[in-house]
Amino acid sequence: MPFLSNEEKLKFLAERGILMRISCVRSDCSPLVTPVWFIYKEKAIYFTPRAESEWFRCLKADPRVALCIDEENLPYRKIIVEGKANIVHDLGADEIWRDLYTEMAERYIDPEFAREYVKNTIDQERALFNVPLSDENTKSWRMPLKGEDETGIWHRRYYAKGTKFSRS
């Protein structure tokens, strides 16, 4: 299956309206998955939990995360990141990074509504986290595009021997 080129990754991460799912670990070691807004800047994914969210408490206790950024339509682009979430600004520092949060909100709702949303929820403290992207912690793929080898729909390991695309 084709991997996303660096150019394809950057374009995908900049698209409006694409949600990220963040998976973190609860204190009982069970997983928690939450769909959230994000923004890609400076080779990292930034996201912001509210103070009262369960996933904020999870991240404070255990920073291990898996991030999934994908789409429902062709070519089914996907980016998976595994790593540790770094706290960039803890609760109470919202004023320092409010412009970034407004920019993040504008990826999901029209700018005039985004500013109003931030203004109306300003009393809800948030923290700012990031996960840097690297070749070591990031996987990406998409369906083959027109003219590309159609056997690239799945990774080779998924084709059973003797089947159409197995080449064995």
Image (cartoon, rainbow, N blue to C red):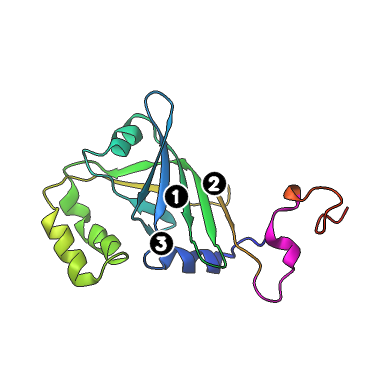
- Percent x, y of residue 79: 52, 55
Q: Residues within 10 Å of mark 3 (few under 14, many from 20)?
A: some
Res. 50 image quadrant: top left
Res. 59 image quadrant: top left
**For the residues carrying marks 3 and 1, which lies nearer the camera in this image?**
3
Between the residue at mark 2 and the residue at mark 3, the CA separation in whole angstroms equals: 20 Å
- Percent x, y of residue 103: 27, 64
According to the image, label 3 marks what residue? Answer: 18
Residues 70 and 131: in front is 70
Tag 1: residue type? Pro
Which residues are the magenta region?
145-156
According to the image, label 2 marks what residue? Answer: 137
What residue do we see at 50% from left, 48% from top? 81
Q: Residues within 10 Å of mark 1 (few under 14, many from 20)?
A: some
Q: Earlier in the sequence, mark 2 or mark 3?
A: 3
Tag 2: residue type? Asn
Compared to residue 42, the image places residue 130 above or below, namely above
- Percent x, y of residue 141: 60, 59
Magenta stretch contains residue 16: no
According to the image, label 1 marks what residue? Answer: 132
